[in-house]
Image (tube, grey):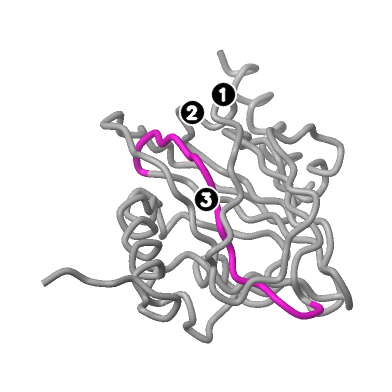
């Protein structure tokens, strides 16, 4: 029996949902290694990276209440090609804009403002469903091993947040070789001086 499509039949939303789930890069995200600079609580960077059916889950990524700037670092288990992103955010904590960086493991909040992004989304629309896709420049988002999402500020107020961040694209079969690197949220000069003294002593003994 043929189906007559109408404005309220739900077929359009079903098709969008099917596309969102089939193209999702969530399975390729290395969730245990996701981190966020200036998040309100530890490991909150993972809260916005969830399945399409869980996009309305109450947990969200929020910045420090007094500072809306955040840097979300998303590593992948294999190289990926990212074609678009969508996000759910609304109200005063919605990001005013997004700056995207590819494979830049050298960035943190001390230097990201001065770095040139692969792409900037200059105006983030209020979206409570995640239907709005932001296409990405395909020549800039090939062979991505790490995606960095910089939120400079919120639309209003001091705290920024993302309820849901959805990345669409394709994963390759090229697995990442993960180095065991310890990231310092705040460097301790005493530790670095100690390391220099130990190196000097080692060279003197040779």
The magenta segment: 77-92
Alpha-carbon distance for marks 1 and 3? 19 Å
Q: Quadrant of the C terminus?
A: top right
Q: Is 181 placed left or right of 178 in the picture?
A: right
Give yes or no for contact between labels 2 and 1 (Cβ–Cβ under 8 Å).
Answer: yes
Element under disc 3: strand
Foreground mark, 1 or 3, reads: 1
Q: Mark 2 points at which residue?
A: 142
Estimate the x, y position of residue 133 in percent, counting from the top left: 56, 54
**Mark 3 Cα shell of 10 Å, populated few (<14), some (14-19), many (≥20):** many
Q: Residues within 10 Å of mark 1 (few under 14, many from 20)?
A: few
Marks 2/3: CA–CA distance: 15 Å
Q: Which residue is painted at 40% across and 70% down in the image?
A: 13
Would residue 47 appear left or right of 148 to someone viewing this image?
A: left
Instruction: Say which label, 1 or 3, has the lower sequence index.
Output: 3
In the rendered structure, does residue 145 fall within the stretch colored magenta?
no
Q: Quadrant of residue 62?
A: bottom right
For label 1, the residue is 139
The CA distance from mark 2 to mark 1 is: 6 Å
């Amino acid at each position: 029996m043929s189906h007559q499509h109408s404005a309220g039949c739900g077929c359009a939303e079903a098709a969008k949902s099917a596309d969102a789930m089939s193209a999702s890069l969530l399975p390729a995200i290395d969730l245990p290694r996701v981190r966020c600079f200036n998040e309100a609580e530890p490991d909150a960077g993972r809260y916005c990276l969830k399945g399409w059916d869980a996009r309305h889950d109450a947990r969200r990524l929020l910045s420090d209440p007094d500072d809306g700037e955040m840097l979300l670092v998303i590593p992948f288990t294999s190289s990926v090609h990212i074609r678009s992103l969508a996000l759910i955010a609304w109200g005063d904590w919605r990001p005013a804009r997004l700056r995207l960086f590819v494979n830049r493991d050298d960035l943190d909040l001390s230097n990201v403002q001065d770095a040139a992004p692969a792409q900037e989304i200059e105006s983030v629309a209020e979206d409570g469903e995640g239907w709005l896709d932001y296409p990405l420049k395909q020549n800039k988002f090939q062979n991505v091993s790490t995606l960095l999402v910089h939120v400079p500020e919120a639309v209003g107020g001091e705290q920024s947040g993302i309820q849901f961040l959805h990345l669409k694209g394709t994963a390759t079969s090229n697995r990442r070789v993960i180095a065991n690197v310890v990231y310092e949220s705040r460097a301790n000069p005493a530790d670095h001086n100690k390391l220099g003294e130990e190196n000097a002593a080692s060279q003197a003994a040779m």
